[in-house]
Image (spheres, rainbow, N blue to C red):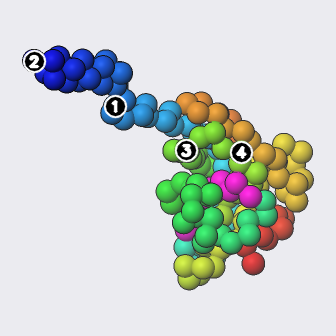
Amino acid sequence: MKFFLQLYIIFAFILCSCNEGLAPPPPIAKSFINGMITYKNGQDKWPPIDSVKDIRVVAFKNYPPKNIIAEITNGDAFFTESMPKFVDTSSYSIEFTKPPIYVKYLVVAQQTGSFMEWRAIGVYTLSGDVSKPDSIYVSPGKVINNININVDFDNLPPQPFQ
């Protein structure tokens, strides 16, 4: 009988001390950056149709990106779905699933040919100097709006992808 009492006390202690110890951790609040892409001189200044395979907005943790493929596969870069082409403006939204994150390089990228052929066509910068990108801190559960990017096909930013 003494054995059962000791066993009961041990189980009661274990049950009381668990206190949701096996419950999953709370979900990480997703964060977003939203904005507009404006193409200078609109549809008339786009390059030839056969050189525009894809357009995406990409957010990198590193500037300049050291190894684009590794950064994307390691989760150090976030990107949109394919964006509209041959338009005057388009809106974008990038979801960050593991905030907080410090985005050091936010860029509009154009795929010009094969899978590996990309170029920067617009950079987020407050000063207007495309050679000096601005950084953005993304907190958990926050939505950052009005992060707008201008694209000027006649004045492309420095190319970190080459």
Callout 3, which amino acid? Lys
Q: Which residue is mark 3?
A: 98
Could you give the CA–CA distance between mark 4 and mark 2, rounded to whole angstroms? 62 Å
Callout 1, which amino acid? Ala
Residue at 37% across, 29% down? 21
Residue at 49% across, 36% down? 28
Callout 2, which amino acid? Met
Residue in the foreground of this view, choosing between 151 and 142? 142
Of pointers 4 and 2, the one earlier in the residue sequence: 2
Residue at 82% across, 47% down? 134
Asked if the residue under mark 1 is in contact with the one under mark 2, i.e. CB atoms within 8 Å, the reply is no
Residue closest to the far bottom: 114
Using a 10 Å C-alpha cutoff, classify the residue at mark 3 as few (fewer than 14 neighbours), some (14 to 19) or many (20 or more): some
Q: Nearer the viewer, mark 2 or mark 1?
A: 2
Asked if the residue under mark 2 is in contact with the one under mark 4, i.e. CB atoms within 8 Å, the reply is no
The numbered dot on residue 102 is 4
Of pointers 2 and 1, the one earlier in the residue sequence: 2
Using a 10 Å C-alpha cutoff, classify the residue at mark 2 as few (fewer than 14 neighbours), some (14 to 19) or many (20 or more): few
- Residue 65 picture location, percent across and down: 73, 65
Residue at 88% across, 59% down? 131
Give the quarter of the figure containing the C terminus: bottom right
Residue in the foreground of this view, choosing between 88 and 100? 100
Q: Magenta stretch: give its range.
A: 54-62
Give the quarter of the figure containing the N terminus: top left
Using a 10 Å C-alpha cutoff, classify the residue at mark 4 as few (fewer than 14 neighbours), some (14 to 19) or many (20 or more): some
Left/right placement of residue 3 relative to residue 25 reads left
